[in-house]
Image (cartoon, coloured by chain):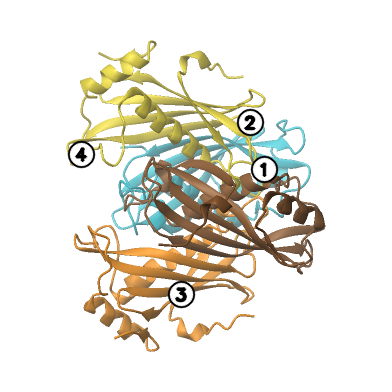
Chain colours: A orange, B brown, C yellow, D cyan
């Protein structure tokens, strides 16, 4: 159906569908996929050595999530094991795009995909700033196919 | 910033940001906006007389949410009163698009907007079916500016 | 069934059961009652003039929730209107007890009750401190039947 | 502090604190512990061969959660690895008690404990029924120290 190039996604984690994530239709509620993708992104940042948590945010800059696109292709159900694939596909001047793909482990079915658009901003003014060079370098090292605006 | 035509949104509800919806950055977590938009959509369906709940889904058809697009424009914070605006902008053959806009009541700031793409399908086969005529009529009655594929 | 003296609960709010709060059994998931009770407690604090939020916590003291007891008596379902009753029943030296009762509006059925045990502590050391006098006075003014350890 | 006999808990799982589970105070929100304990209980049921999910509930009986007691002893923070210990401590005529203990992996700190009281009931009438013999036997096989009312 969709043209998703899984080999480009080097960062992979597994999550199991939990009881409270399933709605009265017996499928994972649509908002919970944003949780799974975020777990993937957090793991991604840790993996490349750019951990972004409550302690590492400094007083000068921060990252804002400005847009999410989620496609729901097949439903996930209780106790399904899901594989969350995460990559950074693109870095612009102040923005970058993280993409996620969720596959059902047992069947290799495509469950969902996500594009999450982020912007680096000044901590106080919320004005966009250039993505810092050390962060760019960490991503470049990890993503051989990175689309980067120089 | 965005060209959002609020007068087109006739369906309006208010939600207050709850304590558990705010993350460690002091702002509403990005997945919770999908909750707010869903509260808006449920209210919309009830308002037009097409309530869609655990009792009204019949054994022949159901509605699938297939795609969400969310823009995060300004942050909402604890105790903020938010106004959720909901409309159906378009009905295709088997699909329809619901749009949501969240405004901060105190300041009229645009917080977020959403497009949620739905498809009517056969309950068992998940194959798309034509949007039922009685449902189309309820939406037509409510939405003078509906973009409808006949 | 239970001996709950509703007239003692002066603080009342309404919440509607939301779609994402209902699990695959068609009833509100057990953890979501803690959300409802917290919404009640936040409203309580605001009502008595002791608002406790991200801005009002000072650098010297904070309040810890140390124990929750929840009874689930009848199930709540999608779109049920619930009335959350909240009171402070007791203030000890460093602790206080908030009680909540949830009633289904349409039928007056008792849905659930809660006791939430809190302790005032030093912000850094987490050692219990005496409940501050200004806070005690606000509660005394609001709760004629308060059980207070002097 | 508390007298918790960890060797009695044979069922153990690990969960990592996720970003969206942390509130604006930087600690896991109190309601999320009920999610962790439930993940533990689901794993417990699967482990003893008594899986309780959307497919296995039959049309004659069901299990109701009627009471939760949770103690919050130490706070868990973002990315903490938690070990959830689960056991059934007691089976009465129609009721049984599941207990949970959460330990922080890195430090062995006690984070929280839980007692969750359940009742087997008739599916339609909600009247208590005797805990079925096959279920009792599965638990007896797993719990050498079970307190069982014969």
Q: Are marks 3 and 4 on the same chain?
A: no
Q: CA distance from mark 3 to mark 2?
A: 43 Å
Determine which residue is flagged by label 4. Answer: C123
Determine which residue is flagged by label 1. Answer: B47
Residue C99, percent from left and from top:
44, 25
Q: In the rendered image, which quarter contains the N terminus of chain D?
A: top left
Q: Chain of mark 2?
A: C
Q: Are marks 1 and 4 on the same chain?
A: no
Determine which residue is flagged by label 2. Answer: C74
Mark 3 or 4, closer to the camera = 3
Determine which residue is flagged by label 3. Answer: A99
Mark 3 or 2, closer to the camera = 3
Q: Residue at x 45, y 31 (%)?
A: C40
Mark 1 or 4, closer to the camera = 1
Q: Which secondary structure, mark 3? A: strand
Q: CA distance from mark 1 to mark 3?
A: 37 Å
């Amino acid at each position: 159906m969709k043209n998703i190039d899984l080999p480009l996604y080097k960062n992979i984690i597994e999550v199991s569908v939990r009881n409270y994530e399933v709605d009265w239709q017996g499928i994972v509620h649509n908002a919970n996929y944003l949780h799974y993708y975020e777990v993937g992104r957090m793991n991604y940042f840790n993996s490349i050595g750019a951990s972004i948590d409550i302690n590492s945010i400094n007083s000068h800059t921060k990252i804002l999530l400005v847009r999410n696109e989620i496609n729901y292709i097949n439903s996930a159900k209780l106790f399904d094991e899901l594989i969350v694939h995460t990559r950074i596909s693109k870095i612009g001047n102040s923005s970058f795009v993280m993409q996620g793909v969720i596959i059902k482990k047992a069947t290799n079915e495509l469950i969902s995909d996500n594009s999450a658009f982020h912007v680096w901003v000044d901590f106080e003014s919320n004005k966009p700033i250039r993505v810092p060079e050390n962060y760019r370098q960490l991503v470049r090292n990890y993503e051989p196919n990175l689309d980067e605006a120089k």
